[in-house]
Image (cartoon, rainbow, N blue to C red):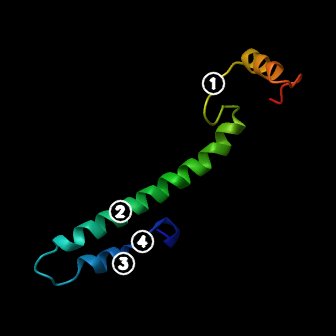
Amino acid sequence: MSLEHGLPPAVVLSMLSDNEANPAPRAPSIMGALAEFERSLIIERVTAGIPAAKKRGKHVGRPPKLSREQFATVAIRCGSERPKR
């Protein structure tokens, strides 16, 4: 595992290795570190997946609210003869 994915294991282990009697104060920071690491993995997968989906011809993003015909009608009514889409 590299540093670009979040905290290295040595940091997490050093957080756990304190000789305190009550490890409860450390739990939120450990959970936060794991959540941050997981989020970085998700972002990395999504970032790699979007170009691959576009290459396969998949639509990436939010679906349009208006059909092409509706968009053309609105463009004409607003004074633009040629839709820009």
Q: Residues within 10 Å of mark 4 (few under 14, many from 20)?
A: some
The structure residue drawn at horizontal position 48% and vertical position 59%, both measured from the top left corner, is: 40
Gap between marks 3 and 2, in whole Å?
Answer: 12 Å
Gap between marks 1 and 2, in whole Å?
Answer: 38 Å
The amino acid marked with disc number 4 is: Leu
Q: Is residue 46 left or right of residue 29?
A: right
The residue lying toward the viewer, choosing from 65 and 18, is 65
> Which residue lies under the disc numbered 3?
11
- Kindly indicate whether the residue at mark 1 contacts the one at mark 3 (C-beta within 8 angstroms): no
Q: Quadrant of residue 23?
A: bottom left
> Which residue lies under the disc numbered 2?
34
> Which residue lies under the disc numbered 1?
65
Q: Is label 1 in a helix, a strand or a loop?
A: loop
Q: Earlier in the sequence, mark 4 or mark 1?
A: 4
Tally the marks.
4
The structure residue drawn at horizontal position 83% and vertical position 30%, both measured from the top left corner, is: 84
> Which residue lies under the disc numbered 4?
7
Q: Is label 4 in a helix, a strand or a loop?
A: loop
Q: Residues within 10 Å of mark 3 (few under 14, many from 20)?
A: few
- Kindly indicate whether the residue at mark 4 contacts the one at mark 3 (C-beta within 8 angstroms): yes
Q: Is label 3 in a helix, a strand or a loop?
A: helix
Q: Quadrant of residue 51?
A: top right
Q: Earlier in the sequence, mark 3 or mark 2?
A: 3
Q: Position of residue 78 (x, y in %)?
A: 80, 24
Gap between marks 2 and 4, in whole Å?
Answer: 8 Å
Q: Residues within 10 Å of mark 2 (few under 14, many from 20)?
A: some
Gap between marks 3 and 4, in whole Å?
Answer: 6 Å
Q: Quadrant of residue 83?
A: top right
